[in-house]
Image (cartoon, coloured by chain):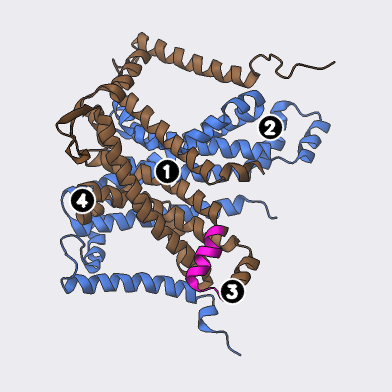
Amino acid sequence: MTLPATAPRGLRPVTMLRIAIIVVALASWEALSASGLLYRDVVPSLLAIAKALFDLLTVPDMPVDLSPFGLQGTASIPAIYWHLYVTFYEIAIGLLIGGLSGLVAGIALGSSRLLRQAYEPLLYYLGPCPKIIFFPVMIMCFGVGPGSKVAMGAISCFFPVALNVAGGMREIDRVLIQVGRSFRANTWQMVTKIYLPAMRHPIINGIRIGLGVCLIGTLLAETKLSNSGVGFLVIQAYSLFNMPLMYALLIVLFVIAIGANTLIGKLGGLDDIKRR
Amino acid sequence: MSTPITKTSWFPAVLSFGSVFAALLLIEILIRLGLINRFIVPLPSDIAAALPRVIIEEQVFSRFLLTATEAFSASILVTVFGVAGGALLYRFRLLREATETWVAAVAAAPLVLIYPLYLVIFGRNATTIVVMGFTAGLAPVMLKTLEGLAGTRRVLINVGRSFNLTPWQQFWKILFPAALPTIFVGMRLGLIFALINIVGVEFLINFGGLGQLINELAERYDLAGTYAAISFVILISINVFILTEWLERWLRPVE
């Protein structure tokens, strides 16, 4: 007897449990919202949050000058996209500066036993320190604008990238290094032809962790002192006690953060390593 | 033949401290020469001189105790709920399969950004700070507890079964002791996450212990004091990490 290729199947128990958990969580939220047990609006109804999210993403409330695009006049866009652009810009520059300097430091630490013994403990113990406490210093050095947020992002992501790259350098197959040396490769060729390709996974992993902490550093700095960016919007929603908007912003932030984390993992082939 | 100086065991430490000292000396010289603005970066000698003043006048030790109490409270909560949550996921396989990826996603999410929400719910007080620390540290402890319990050697579980242990005895006599080193790794991670977030939120909401001290000194534009307080917090953090690392090594079974 042969079974049809696409035999109809019910939902797997795991999927059913997941759906049940989500339904129970949403129902509990709605019940809590309606009960009035917490202060009014602290737990707004799901409908209010959905509306706030929809308005946040679709209602054009910010005029934009079209002249940089070769067009005349102005157009309105939802303000969130401008603030997302500011935050992305700060994170991207921070990641670039912190990531590149972390890469260089990691290669230096990984390629020399003496440098590793001397400086890796410094990075190892400084790495987990709360970076946000450096924000006053960054404000004094780079001002209250995007510069201080970029610096916060850069300093946050430097440590995980440097430590991951240094660890990755030590894991490189000695044979590969000896092959490079036997071809009389210079330092630049060793870095670009041997070290970097062999360390793809530690680098991607470092960047993934670095992106996470860079995002946190930048957004926290925006909540502390800023006039643009998503962090600024969150703290503004808090100041105005606009709870549905705050929840909507947090949903946007978490979707972006988890999405970026997953995307970098997939692009870097980290999932393949786990499955192997 | 004598060992080259760079190969001696003490040279890296000397190089490390020497480099930090040389960097500070260079900054001191550059500031004195006017090449670095002293209204942006204070003299390292001024920072060193400000350290006793900050410690005495700003009641650093009572602030430290406050931060330590918050971190301790968050750690207790993280340990109780994290270990219980991990054990629950281990006990119910279906629940584990359904939610483990969610817990991992939460562990990777920038949870500290919900501090304004906690400000609204709990107010600008120590509860917000403790709950923030708890939120940040919970997922790693859950995941590590699960990892530790799931990694218990089959032979140990079989020994428990051969003695007809009840599920409760099996957990406390076999599973938990076997998973303890991994659980402690999770607790260490949880404590570090909690501490980072507690100091960070203290700074951001200008309330509490050491984090608030930095914020206050920065708002007073006491540059040397701000840098001294930052140095103090870094020193405390490093000591906590070393202490927890030492404890973790002590708990780890000899391989």
**Residue A91 visible in the displayed image:** yes
Q: Chain of mark 3?
A: A
Circle 4 sits on which residue?
A: B217
Q: Amino acid at mark 3?
A: Arg
Q: Mark 4 falls on what kind of element?
A: helix
Q: Which residues are magenta?
A: A183-197
Q: Pointer 3: residues within 10 angstroms few (<14), some, or many (20+)?
A: some
Front label number (1 vs 3): 3
Letter of the chain in brown: A
Q: Are marks 1 and 4 on the same chain?
A: no
Which corner quadrant of the image does residue B68 belong to? Answer: top left
Q: Are marks 4 and 3 on the same chain?
A: no
Letter of the chain in blue: B
What residue is drawn where x is 57% and y is 84%?
B3
Which corner quadrant of the image does residue A242 belong to? Answer: top left
How far across and down, in percent of the image, does residue A190 sit?
Answer: 53, 68
Circle 2 sits on which residue?
A: B171
Q: Mark 2 falls on what kind of element?
A: helix
Circle 3 sits on which residue?
A: A181
Q: Are marks 2 and 1 on the same chain?
A: no
**Mark 4 to mark 2 CA distance (whole Å):** 50 Å
Q: Earlier in the sequence, mark 4 or mark 2?
A: 2
In the image, A259 versus A30, the foreground residue is: A259
**Mark 1 to mark 4 CA distance (whole Å):** 29 Å
Circle 1 sits on which residue?
A: A212
**Residue A234 visible in the displayed image:** no
Q: Amino acid at mark 1?
A: Gly
Q: Are marks 1 and 3 on the same chain?
A: yes
Q: Is residue A107 left or right of residue A174?
A: left
**Dots 2 and 1: beta carbons under 8 Å?**
no
What residue is drawn where x is 78% and y is 34%?
B160
Q: Pointer 4: residues within 10 angstroms few (<14), some, or many (20+)?
A: many
